[in-house]
Image (spheres, helix red, strand yellow):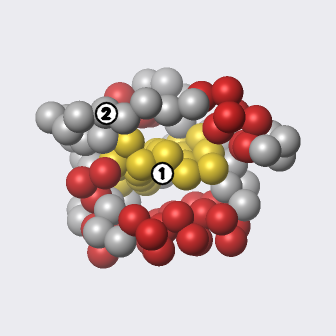
Amino acid sequence: MAVAGGRILAIVDRETAPLFMGVGASVVEVAGSEEVLDAFRRSVVENGVRIVLVLKHLVEDEESLRREADRLGVTLLIIPSMGEKAEPIDVKKLIARALGFG
């Protein structure tokens, strides 16, 4: 599992890790869905991350991950994996929430 620095965390697979590192996000590479929740908890607690991006194909239990994000007070974005249809995101609302205003 490789980790790079930053206040935005991306939990991704090996193929997409360089893309997120290139924009300055902290990156945790996971091999499968069983590693996501543990990587999420550990990275948020140890690194003070405020925004977490997770590739949708890596999430087995989306509701549990969202509950954990709420408990830890971080903004969670489950983003479409390649080939999946994207849904609209209210970026202003998410930024406000990450800054503690929403």
Label 2 crowding class (10 Å Cα cut-off): few <14, some 14-19, many 20+? few
Distance from the alpha carbon under mark 1 to that under mark 2: 26 Å
Say whether residue 44 is left or right of residue 56: right
Rendered view: 83 above or below 23: below
The reply to whether residue 66 is in sight is yes
| Total residue callouts | 2
Query: The disc labelled 1 sits on which kind of residue?
Result: Val
- Tell me the quarter of the image containing the C terminus: top right
Q: Position of residue 54 (x, y in %)?
A: 41, 50
Q: Secondary structure at mark 2?
A: loop
Q: Residue at x 44, y 25 (%)?
A: 22
Label 1 crowding class (10 Å Cα cut-off): few <14, some 14-19, many 20+? some
Q: Position of residue 47 (x, y in %)?
A: 67, 56
Query: The disc labelled 2 sits on which kind of residue?
Result: Ala
Q: Position of residue 60 (x, y in %)?
A: 29, 69
- Tell me the quarter of the image containing the N terminus: bottom left
Q: Residue furthest left?
A: 83
Name the residue tied to disc 2: 86
Q: Nearer the viewer, residue 79 or 25?
A: 79
Q: Residue at x 25, y 41 (%)?
A: 81
Say whether residue 19 is left or right of residue 25: left
Q: Nearer the viewer, residue 14 or 68?
A: 68
Say whether residue 81 is left or right of residue 25: left
Q: Residue at x 60, y 63 (%)?
A: 69
Name the residue tied to disc 1: 3
**Mark 1 or mark 2: whose residue is earlier in sequence:** 1
Q: Secondary structure at mark 1?
A: loop
Q: Residue 70: which quarter of the image?
A: bottom right
Between label 1 and label 2, give the one nearer the viewer.
2
The reply to whether residue 42 is in sight is no
